[in-house]
Amino acid sequence: MDLEVNEPIAHDQLILDLKSWRSVSESVDSFLVIIPTLLGFVLSRILCGHLSLTSTRRFLLEFLLIGLPSVILVTVGNAYSSTYSWVGSIAIMGYLYGNHYHPGKDFKYVVGKRPIVFTLLRATAYSGTCVAILAVDFPSYPHDYRKSRTFGAAAMDMGIGLFVVNMGLVSQRAKSLADLRRLPKSVVPLLVLGLARTLVITMIDYHQDDSEYGKHLNAFFILGFTKLLGSLYSLLVSSDAQLLGLALGLLLVHEVILQLGLTSFVMASDSREGFLTANREGLSSLHGCVALYLLSIYFAKWYTSQDHLNYHQLMTKLGKMFLMVIVCWGLVFASAYITGIARVTFNFGYVTWIFAVAISLIMIYAFIFELKLVNLATKKQNSVGDAKKLKITPYSLPTFVESLNMNGLTHFMLSNFLTGIVNMTLNPGKRNGIDCVLILSLYMFICSGAVFLMLRKGIRLA
């Protein structure tokens, strides 16, 4: 986090300041930054769901509902983000309850093995990251949203954590040594991308903040090592249910080691001599990453344990998730005072915060997309009388989301590439608010348009 001060602040005083109400407030405010994207997905589903998934008109309308608000509300219009969220939420809930419909006690809600709520969470992470990695270079981007260097829960601190969660939600635990044979297919590409990014940055002498992951490591390396270590650790349990105990045990051990002095070393030392010291942030966070990864696998198994639910069963599941949300946020608030919330070490407070954010989003998405919108689509279907006459299906998603689901990594790589181009050619640090919105909007349009065209052509890269 960038702190504007007139005189140096002692390291211990800085830690004390951030282990406080400030981190509690940041954790909630950062979660609320996501809400406009969530609302954009819902509005796109409601207003554009009758159009073909590959329709150019639908893509353009969804860009106006998702992409443009995302750009404006994290830059020149950030002061109005809360107002937009309140108005949008009230309008959507009014629409859903104004069109209330109950399909009957025998109706089955389809969760599936790859629930649409996981897809929505993944799209949320990709979309938010795409905006932030370039917006942060403009003066219009709020300082409070920038990554924390020590303790803190800023909006950009959520990025790597949500990527770890998304990776866990679609992963399987390794049940035997034979399962490890599948690892190279998923781990090696991440490590190669990590190495390529490090080499390119070194060759072009592009500035990067060493306090994020270290001098040589980056997010791709962290995700690759997390996948590798998580698979190895999962061999220690004999069932998916035991993943919860393994994850919590690993997280507690990780926190104890941090409290015994690792946190002070990571945050206080300025030396970058030697590989371990130069990359202490990334290396020290790995076991926290693995704990969150295993916790996400456990949650996914719990969520998909029943893939066809009646109304009562679905409401029971939503009720249990609501209790999880309350417990997780309670732990977040307590951790802000006890252990602090630190992305650089993936400590207990950070892991619980990210899990709380992810579960909260999944619960909201489940309530709207798996319950209310399914009921509404079923009502329309019944009123038509012939399912073939209804263009919208109960479990359809916005084109914006489907495009990111099909080629999310491609979208992420393209956004990183364009971010570098903009930084080297357009000098974003000296641009005014209007320039910021125009450049970011064009950037978002190109990134989302590229994966939309790939969706139309049926091309899947990564």
Image (cartoon, helix red, strand yellow):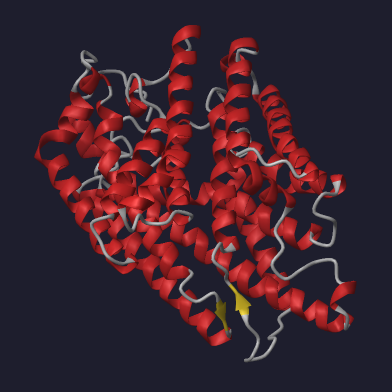
In the picture provided, is 101 more to the left or to the right than 329?
right
At horizontal 80% and vertical 42% (from top left) the residue drawn is: 457
Count of numbered tags: 0
Residue 245, given in percent of the width and then of the height, sits at: 24, 63
Q: Quadrant of the N terminus?
A: top left
Q: Quadrant of residue 246?
A: bottom left
Residue 331, given in percent of the width and then of the height, sits at: 28, 59
Vertical arrangement, residue 199 with respect to residue 334, above or below: above
Residue 430, given in percent of the width and then of the height, sits at: 59, 14
Q: Quadrant of residue 74?
A: top right
Residue ranking furthest to the bottom: 105
In the picture provided, is 71 more to the left or to the right than 456?
left
Q: Quadrant of the C terminus?
A: top right
At horizontal 48% and vertical 50% (from top left) the residue drawn is: 166
Residue ranking furthest to the front: 178
At horizontal 51% and vertical 32% (from top left) the residue drawn is: 142
In the picture provided, is 376 more to the left or to the right than 140?
right
The residue closer to the viewer here, 31 or 144, is 31
Residue 206, given in percent of the width and then of the height, sits at: 48, 12
